[in-house]
Image (tube, rainbow, N blue to C red):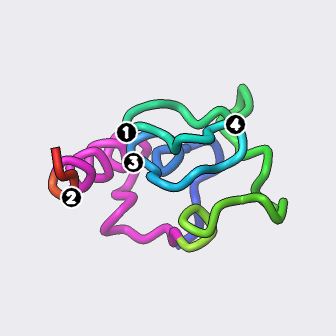
Amino acid sequence: MQCRIGCAACCIAPSISSPLPLHPLGKPANVRCLHLDDDNRCTIFLHPSRPKVCHGFQATEDACGSNREEAMAILSAWEVMTSSG
């Protein structure tokens, strides 16, 4: 499956615990990554500073559903299931 251009659910719904550029303490869940532009495209997608966790995420139907709304719901649910709080 290819990423949906402009979806950005994977850049908003999950938390990222490791530091990344512009997010030195990580990124909380349901917070828009500061590297997203106005069109929901990652501005560091091809940059070496892109975090390994972001680079490793693969778009799949299980994670992304059939549209952006489903992707947000799925990834938000996974975040709740895997959070320690």
Residue 14, percent from left and from top: 39, 48
Circle 4 sits in a helix, a strand or a loop, which is it?
loop
Mark positioned earlier in the residue sequence (4 or 2): 4
Mark positioned earlier in the residue sequence (3 or 1): 3
Q: CA distance from mark 4 to mark 3?
A: 16 Å
Discs 4, 3 touching: Cβ within 8 Å = no
Which mark, residue 22? 4
Q: CA distance from mark 3 to mark 1?
A: 5 Å
Q: Residue at x 71, y 32 (%)?
A: 39
Mark positioned earlier in the residue sequence (4 or 3): 3
> Which amino acid does the dot numbered 4 rest on?
Leu
> Which amino acid does the dot numbered 1 rest on?
Ala
Residue wearing tag 2: 82
Of residues 24 and 6, the one nearer the viewer is: 24
Q: Residue at x 51, y 68 (%)?
A: 57
Q: Which contiguous range is marked in magenta?
A: 57-80
Residue 25, percent from left and from top: 53, 41
Q: Where 44 sits versus 33, above or below? A: below
> How many numbered discs, if any?
4
Residue wearing tag 3: 14
Mark positioned earlier in the residue sequence (1 or 4): 4
- Asked whether, in this view, residue 62 is left or right of residue 26, the answer is left
Q: Where 54 sits versus 37, above or below? A: below
Circle 3 sits in a helix, a strand or a loop, which is it?
loop
Residue wearing tag 1: 29
Residue 82, percent from left and from top: 21, 58
> Which amino acid does the dot numbered 3 rest on?
Pro
Discs 4, 2 touching: Cβ within 8 Å = no
Residue 15, percent from left and from top: 40, 46
> Which amino acid does the dot numbered 2 rest on?
Thr
